[in-house]
Image (cartoon, rainbow, N blue to C red):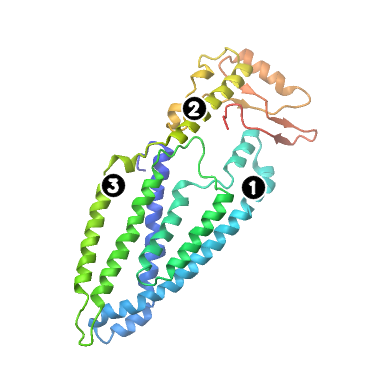
Amino acid sequence: MEGLHSRLAIENHVQIYYFIFLFVQGFLTISLLAGITTIIGELADTIQAVPSVLAQNLPKACNYFFSYIIMSTIITVVSTLIHVKLLMNLSVLSPLFDKTARQKWIRGENVNLQKWGTFIPVFTNIACIGLTYSVIAPLILVFSTVYFTALWVSYRSFPPKLTELDLGTNGLFYPTAIRQLFTGIYFMELCLSGLFFLVRDADDRATCTAQAIIMIVVTALTVLFYYTIDYSHWIRWLPLPDVLKQKIDRMSSQCKDQLDRSCRREVGQHSIVKPGMVQADVVQDEALRASRPVVWIPKDDLGIADDEISHVRSTYNRMWISNEGASLDERGKLKSWGSPPDSCR
């Protein structure tokens, strides 16, 4: 609907909109509705009690966020250690619905695959919650620390599958997450300013007006800093480190060599597009590095697949076909033990 030109742009926009949804639905709505019945009952007496009533009842939402962070920690760690989705896909869904070797391979590659657009905003939202409530209920910092420590330990041992080779990140998701973290900083500074304005002495006079004004100035400076990094070149397109560039070059050369060997063995010189012309740079757009697909059929004991390959090569000299890495057993069940011939994984 937005006319986005690539999956990378789509995932980046999903990351933006999903974070907005999580922040509004999972943070603002709950915070404002915390103790709503008590607030309405007390405001019925006098409208002048709005600031003090809100200051007394907003911290009650922390109880929900304490439970939310604890449950998120437990669910994330358990789902990382116990791959229920992997077991269901490979043991139940794949035998029922996968009829070709490529379908089985795609299911195995995509199982437990986390999309960038829906994976990162969950952590960004919890970080914003921790930042905002750190001035209202500092105990939430302990829960946030436990949450991110558990993530670091679990994902360090069992790193999640975040992307495929056909979706290069180009350094977009990390800067987007950094900009979204400023939302939590804004709300933290505004909450701190409001708390300073609500401080009263024995004579019911504001005693921390200067501190509140300072926080308003700090908020304005934060907005200015956000403006400078949002419109700077380095935060939008982060340069690749030398180590990552060397790894990408090594992957590209390995991919080209594998495609060359496979295509020369299966096709020879029948195709106009030579395998060596395939651009395997993983940081380029899919349209610039896509290669001609190879028809992947399984081997069989009767030699039907070999006859079909010979027939296709003699009839359609520009079609690539292979039966490597897949076979049919004596009961006719499909088995695959490798990647497709046109894949460099």
The residue carrying mark 1 is 89
**Mark 3 vs mark 2, CA separation in Å:** 31 Å
The residue carrying mark 3 is 230
Q: Residue at x 33, y 84 (%)?
A: 41
Whichever of labels 3 and 2 marks the residue nearer the N terminus, that label is: 3
Categorize mark 1 by other alpha carbons within 10 Å: few (<14), some (14-19), many (20+).
some
- Mark 1: which secondary structure? helix
Q: Amino acid at mark 3?
A: Asp
Drawn side of residue 209 relative to residue 234, left or right? left
Write down the quadrant of residue 161 in the picture: top right
Q: Is the Cβ of the residue at disc 3 closer than 8 Å to that at disc 2?
A: no
Q: Is the Cβ of the residue at disc 3 closer than 8 Å to that at disc 1?
A: no
**Mark 3 vs mark 1, CA separation in Å:** 41 Å
- Mark 3: which secondary structure? helix
Viewer-nearest of discs 2 and 1 = 2
Numbered badge on residue 280: 2
